[in-house]
Amino acid sequence: MIAENLARLRERIERKCKEVGRNPEEIRLIAVSKYFGTDAILEANKAGVKDFGENRAQELMLKFEKIGNQVIWHFIGTLQKNKVKYAVKAAEYIHSVDSIELLEEINKRASSLNKVQKILLEVKTSYEETKSGLTNEEEIFRIAEETKKYQNVNLVGLMTIAPLTDDENLIRKSFRDLRLLRDKLNKSELNITELSMGMTSDFEIAIEEGSTMLRIGSAIFGERDYSKDWRQV
């Protein structure tokens, strides 16, 4: 089932890229594997997926201990300072940096592992109270500038989650605002290349607006069983 789902998904991605004159190779497909076991991850990997995203630091660590660096791990959920050690050990990319305090902790943990941690700043581009991320442009610029001081972090991108709505204009605005912010930041001698935006319900709009990282779960793995104990993976 996973291989068939992936074939359909890739076809949609390629079709949309062709429509808007983009190269599908520019887009990294991240399979969001939270609540799915290592068997599903390995099945998707066998079908050609290299990148996997996890929302919980301890779940990521558990899967990393079983699979290791066979795949590229992305931490995409809210990250607490006391869980940074797990994310830095396992993930090549952390998508959800939203404070200088978190940045400092990531740098410290990465330094202890002699690692340069790739990070993205999480930006809130929607009106929804349930969404997290940075909202103040001045603060975003301050944190982006702060990354230049640290040897063990590399700011490579921005991440956002569009509002959960049927209004495509609002979704598009969310993605466009992130792209415009990226362009503005890059005028300050930054080299931000990645835009992590677009999920199962809105990835085609994200492609139109310049996404380079799609975070897609249910279109690959099917619906999640949230009653399942995530530790049994």
Image: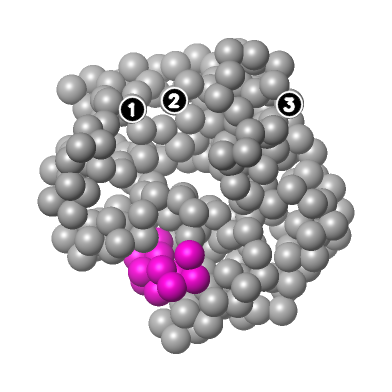
Left or right: 185 in relation to 41: right
Residue 175's quadrant in the figure? top right
Residue type indicated by callout 2 = Thr
Secondary structure under tag 1 reads: helix
Counting other residues with Cα less than 10 Å from the Cα at mark 1, is it few (<14), some (14-19), or many (20 or more)? some
**The N terminus - image quarter:** top left
12 sits left or right of 47 in the view: right
Question: Which residue occupies 36% across, 69% down?
Answer: 86
Q: Are marks 3 and 2 in contact (CB under 8 Å)?
A: no
Mark earlier in primary sequence (2, 1): 2
Question: Reading the chain from its start, which is encountered first: label 3 or label 2?
Answer: 3
Residue 180: percent from the left, percent from the top? 79, 39
- Given contact means CB atoms under 8 Å apart, are the residues at marks 2 and 1 in contact? yes
Residue 200's label in the rendered image is 2
Q: Residue 188: within the magenta? A: no
Q: What residue did someone put label 1 on?
A: 218
User: Real-space Cα distance between discs 2 and 1?
Assistant: 7 Å
Residue at point 13% right, 51% down? 232
Percent of width and height locating residue 187:
86, 54
